[in-house]
Amino acid sequence: MLHIVLMLSCTLIATPRIDPTEAYDYEFAEEQPCSVVNSVFNPGEKIVYKIYYNWGFIWIAAGEVVFNVVDKGDQYHISAAGRTYKSYDWVFKVRDYYDSYVAKETLLPKRTIRKVLEGNYRLYDDVTYQHHRSKAISKKGKSAEDLETEEVTLNGCTHDVLSSIYMMRNLDFADKPAGSRLPMNIYLDRKIYSLDVIYAGKDDAKRIKGLGQCSALEFRPQLVVGNVFKDNEGMIVWVSNDDNKIPLMIESPISVGSVKAVLSEYSGLKYPAPF
């Protein structure tokens, strides 16, 4: 569950008013920035999303994901914890944890730790990034006691899935034309994915259940096709069009049904809430 939400959150998506078959003629940047000055979040920020799964015409509240930021000297410790509700555990139990330690001056990851429990599936992956060598060292296995080490070559300035969310929040798309794109290099499961994030326009009256209405930016990403996503398009992400730039809601078809993540709680924002 958590890896789905993280992929939904970071690989931002599209508004229906842009035809996905059209060519995108504008570039936000020729390449992913290697250094981004953080101006949108502070240590102590906490953001919570409620996760819904859909079968047919029924949306079922299945769990939640909690994002936190902690000050660690010259680093931010950014964490995400996803779990199904106990009432849903009998269907498919999830307990996922994702920790990213990022350099404050660049927002590039220094270390990533993933602990995954999804049904009978188990994964532990501890990755150390050596950006000066363009290398990542992955220690991966079913648990922290059963690990195999592999060195992976990075492609330029590479982010993990979690650090890319917080890097993207610091980019200013609001004055860019719809169709502007930004290339991204994402590390996931010992592979580097080169994906485009495409800005699709504004929604000045996006309503979030239980919180209210605000101006939002809409995006379209390329997705990693595989066991989770049917194809590389179809997801929609709304991000607050304010100084916080927090993801508000995410929708996407997946291999079985569809999934939606909706902002439900927040605290410790650097700026006043957008609602």
Image (tube, grey):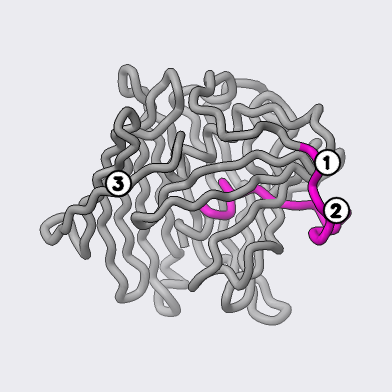
Left or right: residue 7 versus residue 243 is left
The CA span between labels 3 and 1 is 35 Å
Q: Where is residue 106 in the image (x, y as percent from the top left)?
A: 45, 23
**Residue under the image location 39 percent in, 55 percent down:** 191
**Residue under the image location 21 percent in, 61 percent down:** 141
Q: Identify which amino acid the numbered label 3 is placed on.
A: Ile
Q: Mark 2 points at which residue?
A: 18
200 or 272: nearer the eye?
200
The image quadrant where one finds the C terminus is top right
26 or 215: nearer the eye?
26
Q: Name the residue under label 1.
A: 178
Q: Where is residue 107 in the image (x, y as percent from the top left)?
A: 45, 27
Mark 3 vs mark 2: which is more N-terminal?
2
**Residue under the image location 61 percent in, 41 percent down:** 183
Q: Identify which amino acid the numbered label 2 is placed on.
A: Ile
Task: Tell me if mark 3 has few (under 14), some (14-19) or many (20+) residues whose alpha carbon lies within 10 angstroms of its own.
Answer: some
- Asked whether the beta carbons under mark 2 and mark 1 sit within 8 Å of each other, the answer is yes
Residue 8: within the magenta?
yes
Residue 58 to residue 242: above or below: below
Residue 166 to residue 12: above or below: above
Mark 3 vs mark 1: which is more N-terminal?
3
Q: Judge depth for marks 3 and 1 and give the one in front.
A: 1
- The quarter of the picture where residue 176 lies is top right
**Residue under the image location 47 percent in, 62 percent down:** 1
The span picked out in magenta is 7-26
- In the drawing, what numbered circle is on residue 198? none
Q: Mark 3 points at which residue?
A: 113
In the structure shown, which secondary structural element does the residue marked by tag 2 occupy? loop
Q: Identify which amino acid the numbered label 1 is placed on.
A: Ala
